[in-house]
Image (spheres, rainbow, N blue to C red):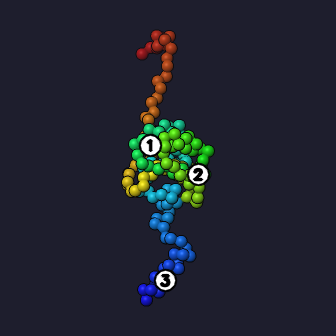
Amino acid sequence: MSENTDLESQLKSRMTGTPQTKPDERRHYLGSLRERVLLQITVAQLGDARTLPAFKQAVPKFTGAKLLLNGKLAATLKPYLQYATQNNLAFTMVNDESANTASDAVALLLVASTAVDQADVTISQYYSPVTKEQPKHSFLADLFQRD
């Protein structure tokens, strides 16, 4: 009887392909798993001017990591791709069904080869604090200001 079920499972796997663990998670994380993610940038965060400097600051902290880039955003990700090539950072352009262009979709991931289970993987933790510039007053305005 076990021979029959073994043959049946082999036929199913040949017809449908090798079963994949956590397919929804892999679709969201550009083919990787959440437990391997070190750093994540969403499509919406690409528009923030603080993202690229924060990325350049964070990447050296993760030695041996690999970059996964959303291939449908190749033009937008050009500075990140240039940084990866200049710094010998391994990268892969992902251009399958997991690559999405919605604002909350993943644009870029820095992943480890094994599970790291890092709690906070958002790029915003590396943003420099925004300092408000004090408005400049003229000398005369300060002289004539009454308390």
Q: Give the class, few, some or many, for how many residues have Cα within 10 Å of label 1's Cα (few <14, many ≥20).
A: some
Please state the horizontal and vertical placement of residue 17, each as a whole percent of the image: 53, 71
Q: Is residue 51 visible?
A: no
Q: CA distance from mark 2 to mark 1?
A: 20 Å
Residue at the front extreme of this rendering: 88
Does 96 sit above or below residue 16?
above
Does 89 sit above or below residue 22?
above
- According to the image, label 1 marks what residue? 59
> Amino acid under label 3?
Leu
Please state the horizontal and vertical placement of residue 122, each as a whole percent of the image: 44, 47
Quadrant for the N terminus, please. Answer: bottom left
Q: Nearer the viewer, residue 67 or 51?
A: 67
- According to the image, label 3 marks what residue? 7
Q: Give the class, few, some or many, for how many residues have Cα within 10 Å of label 2's Cα (few <14, many ≥20).
A: many
> Amino acid under label 2?
Gly
Residue at x 40% of width, y 42% of height? 61
| Lower sequence index among marks 1 and 3 | 3
| Lower sequence index among marks 2 and 1 | 1
Residue at x 47% of width, y 39% of height? 56
Does 123 sit above or below residue 13?
above
Please state the horizontal and vertical placement of residue 146, each as a whole percent of the image: 44, 14
Residue at x 55% of width, y 73% of height? 16
Q: CA distance from mark 2 to mark 3?
A: 39 Å
Q: Give the class, few, some or many, for how many residues have Cα within 10 Å of label 3's Cα (few <14, many ≥20).
A: few
> Amino acid under label 1?
Val
Q: CA distance from mark 1 to mark 3?
A: 48 Å
| Lower sequence index among marks 2 and 3 | 3
Look at the numbered disc 1 and give the secondary structure of its residue: helix
Quadrant for the C terminus, please. Answer: top left
